[in-house]
Image (cartoon, helix red, strand yellow):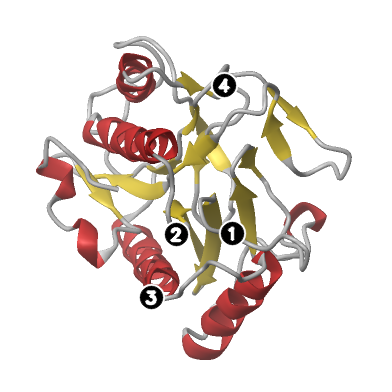
Amino acid sequence: MTKQPHEVALLAESGRLLASVFGLLDRTPLAGKSTLEIDAMVERFIVDELKARPASKGQYGFQFVLNSSVNQVVCHGVPSPSDILADGDIVNLDITLEKNGYIADSSKTYLVGNVDAAARRLVQTTYEAMWKGIRAVRPGARLGDIGWAIERHAKRNGCSVVREYCGHGIGREMHEAPQVRHFGERGTGLELREGMVFTIEPMLNRGGRSVKTEADGWTVVTRDGSLSAQFEHTVAVTATGVAVLTLRPDERGMIDSPAAPA
């Protein structure tokens, strides 16, 4: 379950490359693009520019490079040529990347054009909740500390936490032990040790927490049709705290920051 220092270094390299994919997306106007166009652009960048592998493609039979989850889609949204991003949408883009045998996983919810205040608050709260969970990571802490920090922030801001999906250990395989819940009680669960690497990826809804899977077997949506948002980083437990392996350049300093702008 724990990784050796050279393995953490390789995971950090995968994470650095994955962060650059989000840099590309940050520079890309998303309105008017289909989610399939975005998927193809990301694949070209990972394969041609970064000389890496999009780890989600082919995993569990999934045929795309990323998950594109728009508005009420909670997770596992399937890219489509008919799914055109429009002004006012929010979209989570969840991407994995493998380099030298090690996988990094990260996601970000984007605001497309003029997004209303309620959606902006949801996205902001979700981003802050992820950072609350990240800041709970240190040797000797418990997995429950992460979930408690996330759930408390969500509830204080009128959001619900999706319980059916969780973070996970990651390394040579995309999904390893342990499972990292985004709800829980302080002081409970597995004790964190230096060398553990896992994702923290809360999914928050504006309405109730119940979800359902659509007929395609992939797309998960809110049962009440309310908006959902997600953010994700891959983190490593260090001797003194936490390292965010997929940290983007604009996020430097966020671990110690009391607030986290979206």
Q: Secondary structure at mark 1?
A: loop
Give the answer, above or below, for where 257 lies relative to 225: below
Gap in angstroms between the C-alphas marked 3 and 4: 33 Å
- Label 4 crowd (10 A; few <14 / some 14-19 / many >=20): some
**Sequence-wise first label, 3 or 4:** 3
Disc 1 versus disc 2: distance between alpha carbons? Answer: 8 Å
Pick the front one: 208 or 252: 208
Kindly identify which residue carries mark 3: 27
Mark 1, Cα crowd under 10 Å, few <14 / some 14-19 / many 20+, is some
Residue in front for this viewpoint, 252 or 188: 252
Q: Give the number of the mark in front: 1 or 3.
A: 1
* Residue depicted at 34% across the width and 33% down the height: 125
Residue position for label 4: 163
For this orientation, the residue located farthest to the right is 215
Q: Could you give the CA–CA distance between mark 1 and mark 4, rounded to whole angstroms?
A: 29 Å
Asked whether the residues under the numbered discs 1 and 2 touch, taking CB atoms below 8 Å apart as contact, a structural biologist would say yes
**Secondary structure of residue under mark 3:** loop
**Mark 3: amino acid:** Arg
Which dot marks residue 113? 2
Indicate the amino acid at tag 4.
Arg
Secondary element under disc 2, as helix, strand or loop, is loop
The Cα–Cα distance between marks 4 and 2, rounded to whole angstroms, is 30 Å
Q: Assign a secondary structure to mark 4.
A: loop
- Locate residue 186 relative to residue 234 in the image: left or right: left
The answer to whether residue 101 is visible is no
Q: Check disc 1 and report the residue beneath it.
A: 86
Q: Earlier in the sequence, mark 3 or mark 2?
A: 3
**Which quarter of the picture shows residue 64?**
bottom right
Question: In this view of the protein, which residue sits in the foreground, 127 or 140?
Answer: 127
Observer-side mark, 3 or 2, equals 2
In front: label 4 or label 2: 2
